[in-house]
Amino acid sequence: MAKIGIYGGTFNPPHLGHVLAARAAKASLGLDQVLLIPDGQPPHKELPEGSPTPEQRLEMTRLAAKTEPWLKACGIEFGRPGKSYTSDTLRELKRQYPDDTLYLLMGTDMFLSLHTWHEPQVICQHSVIVGFRRQEDPEGEMEAQKKNLEASFGARVELVDNQPLEISSTQLRRMLVLGGAAHYSIPSVLEYIRAHGLYGTGRDYRNLPMEELRDVATSLLKPRRIQHVLGCAKTAKALAERYGADPVLAERAGLLHDITKAMDGPDQLLLLDEYDIIVSDFERNHPKLLHAKTGAGVAQHLFGECDQVVSAIYWHTTGKPDMALMEKIVYIADYMEPTRNFPGVEELRKAVFADLDRGLLRGFEMCIAELIRENKTVCRDSVDARDYLRRQLGGTEA
């Protein structure tokens, strides 16, 4: 009697994190084989628009399975119409492997919601439930769910410690466009993706028309950031019209200024390497600042933007002394765009449209004061930018 792991998912695309999780389960449970099963029609979420075909997802899964002799891709769910329910898949697999024990491998989030799935009693009847346990579980949620499944459905439950590779398929799809994906990718799968132009890898992003640039930029953001970026672009355009800068370039800079914001600190470092960007030790130790530098790299190398746009993105988080007009516009547009809501922001907006430099100085003063109140370290570039404006304005403060 064999022990067979069942590892389902959209695999859109499969990546190293999936293989590492399967390895952890095999080592912990003594599994003889692990089946990688791409979802046909996931019942819990829709596949993103423009996703590869089922055949392409299955082929990528086959390539991922070739990394280990005990891994096997299985397209069982593509042969059934309608939603791909795990209970139906397990029924069919149990008919194929009547004498073997099936182990259903699940990430933490899936494990914690299993009781809400379609026919959870059937799932528990036909398989041992395996939850991948993160190192940190301060509330004891995994153990509590284990007891709940055992009591409610008579489930056999195993918890496997897994040090997950901190990457999701959503994040990897973003990185396939912006850069850094190789760190998390299975080489053969990455080669297949690029060869077939999947996930936008075959598109030329240089010099996109404004509407296309807006669509691409917002597609690479987390949903909660979209309105901020659109507000920044609109404000930058208005300021450019007010002060004689190029409104088209200002809007483009606004749309791209946070293009890498969705990526966390380690992935920002991957982008620094990808685009050969040198930053200070202070910036490396404060990852929230890095998206300005990596965003500038992406704007230049991927989108083919001009120096004015690239420089404005590069300095939009900290500013610097003697800023160019476009740099001033994008910095302050980011700080005061319409979704920003903090004490004094309305007065700041009026000041900026009345006198850019005096308004900009007021913005630096407010930002620095806020960081000090929050006991956060202030970047030297911001202090130098403020002091430069003070000198230029004759020592006055906004």
Image: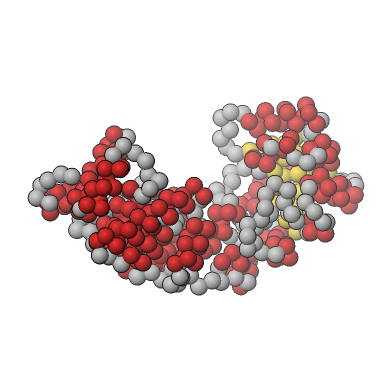
Colour setup of the view: secondary structure
| Lateral position of residue 112 relative to residue 235, left or right | right
Figure disc tally? 0
Q: Residue at x 82, y 49 (%)?
A: 89
Residue lying at the far left of the rendered structure: 394
Q: Is residue 42 above or below residue 195?
A: above
| Lateral position of residue 308 relative to residue 80, left or right | left
Is there any visible trace of residue 275 in the rendered image?
no
- Percent x, y of residue 345: 31, 42
Residue 135: quadrant of the picture? top right
Of residue 366 and residue 283, the one placed in the foreground of this image is: 366
Q: Is residue 118 above or below residue 72?
A: above
Of residue 11 and residue 7, the one placed in the foreground of this image is: 11
Of residue 149 and residue 222, the one placed in the foreground of this image is: 222
Q: Residue at x 19, y 50 (%)?
A: 358
- Percent x, y of residue 105: 72, 44
Q: Residue at x 70, y 64 (%)?
A: 53
| Lateral position of residue 191 relative to residue 321, left or right | right
| Lateral position of residue 144 relative to residue 88, left or right | left
Q: Residue at x 77, y 51 (%)?
A: 83
Q: Which of the image's four quarters has the C terminus?
A: top left
- Percent x, y of residue 235: 35, 55
Q: Is residue 90 above or below residue 153?
A: below
Is there any visible trace of residue 265 in the rendered image?
yes
